[in-house]
Image (cartoon, rainbow, N blue to C red):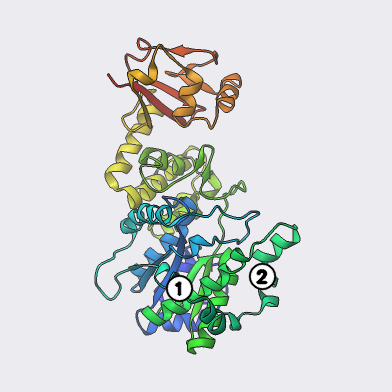
Amino acid sequence: MTYHPKSEFMSVMIERGFLADCTDYQALDDAMLSGVVPAYIGFDATATSLHVGSLIQIMMLRWLQKTGHKPITLMGGGTTKVGDPSFRADERPLLDDAAIQANIDGIQKVFATYIDYSDTPTGAVMVNNAEWLDELNYIEFLRDIGRHFSVNRMLSFESVKSRLDREQSLSFLEFNYMILQAYDFLELNRRYGCLLQMGGSDQWGNIVNGIDLTRRVLDQEIYGLTSPLLTTSDGKKMGKSADGAVWLNAEMRSPYEFWQFWRNTTDADVGRFLKLYTELPLDECDRLGALAGSEINDAKIVLANEVTTLLHGAEAARAAEATAREVFEKGGVGDELPTLELSPEELGDGISVVQLIVRSGLAKSGKDAKRLIAENGARIDDAPLTDAGLMLDASALSSPVKLSAGKKRHALVKLNT
């Protein structure tokens, strides 16, 4: 990166590693210096929670507001009905209005912990693109907006090209997605004076489309900025863990499990993740990231505490760290471990340990649980679990039972009486 920014926002984006590309560094930097810049990121409502993979975008909106600008969180109530085909091998399942609204309600909870939605010049606004997309007249839209798009150019975008090159079907519905996303930018500029769209680098083509359309229709100068698509140093996609997606909503991933995900960060990623996912000063991120040997574990605890505090609050972070120390350093049980509570009816005459491992989230299937046991990766109350046929009855569950998968993943099973 050779550009030397003058605005605080652009400095943060570059120095902390958020910036992959920008349509016009100088002009956007100047706009940031001349007043409050409204900027948006779009989030399609395909699940009831966002996961860690979206956290880099949420942090970008947080820094935007902290440096004196106005975040717009655009919920894709309309575009979710179409589905973004970008770099996907197959078509997304289509959701009805009720499912989309339920997902939006779930996602909204997270934003309020990172961004201030107060009625101030830099107060964030949450907008649903169904407001304008649901009302579109198809013929008018084709005539007024569709004429600005070249099919030849649309076919050249990597997100479309890669699908066609693999001879995988791309429906006309999905092909329209990039036009609708471009139209979002135009509408947000028209309604809120939005000057900037941000997103992951896989959204570059869609962002450029929106900029071109807005210039043509409204004669407005607007900008695009993308963040790198993050993978961990061992090549895994950010947001995934051994037991599935790392959700941001507490009811889908407990604060302790969320804390543990960050505590388990690979050594090589600690410094980078501190810059992206916390607000610690850069020199402190560099110092912690450079620690070696067992000291890097202290840096990982700082990372886990800082990220968990931003999402779930300082008390949840403290409780998670205390539980981790209890479980790992003292061999105890810990108060914050994920807990599976069984009713007497569910227990019946007994329940298999394989079923408990699956239901407590330590394995995805019975087959996975049996493999875990066969490979000596499972423990029960810190003792090796070797019998995949073990049954637990009411007497075995008279006090909570601790199940473990490997050294780092644990859950409690308790009987409700």
Q: Residue at x 74, y 57 (%)?
A: 166
Image position of 382 with respect to 194: above or below: above
Q: Quadrant of residue 321?
A: top left
Q: Quadrant of residue 83?
A: bottom right
Q: Secondary structure at mark 1?
A: helix
Image position of 359 with respect to 194: above or below: above
Q: Residues within 10 Å of mark 1 (few under 14, many from 20)?
A: many
Q: Is residue 14 visible?
A: no
Total labels: the figure holds 2
Q: Is residue 310 left or right of residue 293?
A: left
- Residue 45 placed where, x, y %? 45, 57
Q: Which residue is mark 2?
A: 157
- Residue 302 placed where, x, y %? 39, 46
Q: Nearer the viewer, residue 256 or 322?
A: 256
Residue type of the residue flagged with mark 1: Met
**Where does the C terminus fall, quadrant-wise?**
top left
**Where does the N terminus fall, quadrant-wise?**
bottom right
Residue type of the residue flagged with mark 2: Phe
Q: Nearer the viewer, residue 38 or 82?
A: 82
Q: Is residue 263 visible?
A: yes
Q: Which residue is mark 1?
A: 10
- Residue 11 placed where, x, y %? 45, 71
Q: Residues within 10 Å of mark 2 (few under 14, many from 20)?
A: some
Distance Cα–Cα, label 1 vs label 2: 27 Å
Going from the N terminus, do you reach mark 1 or mark 2 first?
A: 1
Comparing labels 1 and 2, the label whose residue is closer to the camera: 2
Q: Secondary structure at mark 2?
A: loop
Q: Nearer the viewer, residue 37 or 262?
A: 37
